[in-house]
Amino acid sequence: MLRFLNAGESHGPALTAIVEGMPAGVPVTEEYINTQLARRQMGYGRGGRMKIERDQVEFTAGVRGGFTLGTPICLVIRNRDYANWEKTMTPSPSADLDERVVTRPRPGHADLAGAIKYNHADIRNVLERASARETATRVAVGALGRRLLEMFGIQIFGHVVQIGSVRAVIPPSYEEVRRLAAASELFCADPEAEQAMKTEIDASKEAGDSLGGIFEVVVTNLPVGLGSFVQWDRKLDGRLAQAVMSIQAVKGVEIGMGFRAATLPGSQVHDEIFYGSGGFYRCTNRAGGLEGGITNGEPLVIRAAMKPIPTLYKPLKSVDLATKEPFAASVERSDTCAVPAAAVVAEAAVAFELARAMIEKFGGDSLAEMQRNYEAYVAYVRQV
């Protein structure tokens, strides 16, 4: 089974991930991973940390000569800002634990609940790990999943649908959406809406506030049959929703028509089935590529809502953990809007989960073995 664990604090020495279960023979380079890491740091409305970090991955195990070995892959991303925090964040007993202490929990963060749960008097012990900085490793491991998917002609991209009150008009062609989003500073396929989004971000920054929004991830050329209906935890829609929902600040996930389907009669929700020279097909994709927890061959469409980042430069009211006195919540360096970055992280989360599903369906210890199994299955599907 494909899986990963990651570790690291926001201002610690490095972020680390270990990926287990990736087949041997998948071509991948550090430069390929770094391209995705750079995309995560892009986007209008990002904060000062993005000017410090230039994320670069380092393979320390599991890759040789540009190919995966089938053994555990270890990826390391050094934190450049650690040089400014070493006195505070060093693992050594010499760490100055009285410096940069945080006792004022920020509303909307894991600060207060995490401090209570783990019995920490210093909230820094919570926020350093709960930070969205952790998503750098998820983008790195997701890039490995993306690379595997590419070996089967599967493509994935994300784009921003809405920021604040501004909603984009999405072109009907996925290829056009991909092209326009790639050229956009906000990964938005509507240039007019993008300008309005920037104006709203600027106004929010000026007010010391933050903005959330909605992003969408689209995956094309998936085969029929990934996932399963036989057990609740094997349903691919549930697995994908959990992967995306686990991204910091994401508060809602929908697939296909999503919540809108609840407002319409069934005749306007379900996709009619037809048969032609190419086999079974549908003229609509209201289901978003998934039926009964299984991919149906149509493009996979996942949408997620991201709340405004809870760290505000105009802090909300809170209560000091130590003194119990009311204070304005502490301010850690943050973004005004990170919706474009969240879209990139979601691409990675979806890519990794789909890579898991591909390995489950076409399992093999090497890419060559998987490809043989895949080709035989595709030939079978064409004959059904």
Image (cartoon, rainbow, N blue to C red):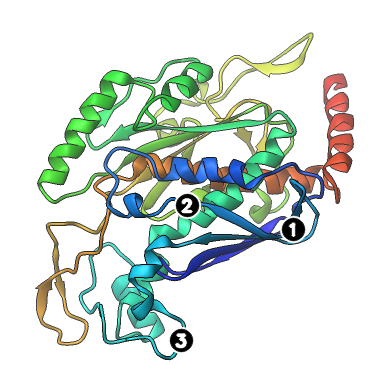
Evaluate whether residue 239 shows in this view: no
Task: Give the x, y percent position of residue 79.
Answer: 44, 62
Evaluate whether residue 16 shows in this view: yes
Residue 111 lies left or right of residue 156; in this view the side is left
Task: Give the x, y percent position of residue 136.
Answer: 48, 54
Q: Earlier in the sequence, mark 3 or mark 2?
A: 2
* Residue position for label 3: 92
Residue 96 position (above or below residue 47): below
Mark 1 Cα-neighbour bin, 10 Å: few <14, some 14–19, many ≥20: some
SS at circle 2? loop
Location of the C terminus (image quadrant):
top right
* Residue position for label 1: 62
* Residue position for label 2: 55
Q: As rendered, which of 202 and 214 lies closer to the eye? A: 202
Q: Could you tell me how far apart the alpha carbons at marks 2 and 1 are, in whole angstroms?
A: 20 Å
Q: Amino acid at mark 2?
A: Asp
Identity of the residue drawn at 75% across and 52% down: 22
- Residue 285: which quarter of the image? top right
- Residue 119: which quarter of the image? bottom left
